[in-house]
Image: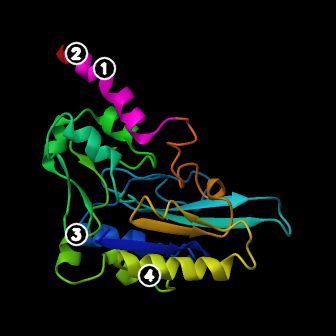
């Protein structure tokens, strides 16, 4: 399948938040009003004005088994996006997929979509609603930059090589090579959902230790992606008669 792909090597992420800030700057999004929640993670979650957030997780006890794990969380740009499938059944082209890059784009038409349906269709809990405009928001892969031959702002800013971006085959080859290196010392390393998404994370440890929705939970629930969508859309079909 053609198009672009991110490879995010979490073994190299230092949680500098450069990617988070670069996203804000390029999109000209305002800062969040936040407060101390007892974590270095700030803001505490994604929102309509925070499309990328670096998550912090403390795992283990104070000692040899203590780990501080970081996750620059964002839309995964699924190869076959369930959010788009759900949206197309309600408002055609409210959610689109760029033919050249594969980016999943939420348009202004998303204000006509039921937010709970679109959010519920996403196995990674990414979409967020603007309470004022009712438009649903998420990362768009900096598609304007990519189509102009530039890197996404987050990748351009990353100082450690944790974030990489390019043609899909090239990125998957890089990811698999790095995975083979990492698993020699980190036997629980995982190349997360690499065949399903365009944002491929390499973890050193079990994905659930980083964040509960780092790995797709569609299959563990015992439902296929299409069964999930059918369940979500059933009430809408019934309402229309």
Disc 2 versus disc 3: nearer the observer: 2
Q: Position of residue 88 (x, y in %)?
A: 20, 40
Q: Mark 4 points at which residue?
A: 158
Number of the label disc, if any, that sits on residue 235: 1
Badge 1 vs badge 2, beta-carbon distance below 8 Å:
yes
Q: Name the residue under label 3.
A: 143
In this rendering, the answer to whether 79 lies above or below 4 is above
Q: What stretch is highlighted in magenta?
A: 223-239
Quarter of the picture containing the C terminus is top left
Q: Is the magenta stretch mostly helix, strand or loop?
A: helix
- Membership of 103 in magenta stretch: no
Q: Distance of mark 1 from mark 2, alpha carbons?
A: 6 Å
In this rendering, the answer to whether 164 lies above or below 209 is below
Taking the spot 41% from the left edge, 68% from the top edge, the residue there is 20
Whether residue 105 appears in this view of the structure is: yes
- For mark 1, give the secondary structure: helix
Who is closer to the viewer here, 24 or 212? 212
Q: Position of residue 181 (x, y in %)?
A: 65, 83
Q: Mark 2 points at which residue?
A: 239
In this rendering, the answer to whether 73 lies above or below 86 is below
Disc 1 versus disc 3: nearer the observer: 1
In this rendering, the answer to whether 214 lies above or below 238 is below
Q: Distance of mark 4 from mark 1, alpha carbons?
A: 44 Å
- For mark 2, give the secondary structure: helix
């Amino acid at each position: 399948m053609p198009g672009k792909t991110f490879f995010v090597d979490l073994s190299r992420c230092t949680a500098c938040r450069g990617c988070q800030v670069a996203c804000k700057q390029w999109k000209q999004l305002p800062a969040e009003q936040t407060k101390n929640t007892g974590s270095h993670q700030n803001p505490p979650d994604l929102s309509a004005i925070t499309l990328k957030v670096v998550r912090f997780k403390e795992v283990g006890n104070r000692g040899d088994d203590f780990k501080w794990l970081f996750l620059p969380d964002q839309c995964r740009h699924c190869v076959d996006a369930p959010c788009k499938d759900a949206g197309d059944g309600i408002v055609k082209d409210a959610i689109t997929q760029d033919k050249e890059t594969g980016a999943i784009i939420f348009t202004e038409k998303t204000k006509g979509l039921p937010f709970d349906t679109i959010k519920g269709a996403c196995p990674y809990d990414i979409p967020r609603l603007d309470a004022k405009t009712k438009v649903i928001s998420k990362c768009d892969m900096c598609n304007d930059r990519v189509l102009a031959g530039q890197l996404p702002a987050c990748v351009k800013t990353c100082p450690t090589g944790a974030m990489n971006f390019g043609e899909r085959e090239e990125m998957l080859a890089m990811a698999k090579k790095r995975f083979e290196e990492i698993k020699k010392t980190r036997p629980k390393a995982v190349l997360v959902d690499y065949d399903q998404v365009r944002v491929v994370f390499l973890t050193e440890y079990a994905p659930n230790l980083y964040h509960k929705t780092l790995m797709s939970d569609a299959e563990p629930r015992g439902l296929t992606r299409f069964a999930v969508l059918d369940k979500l859309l059933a009430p809408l079909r019934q309402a229309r008669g």
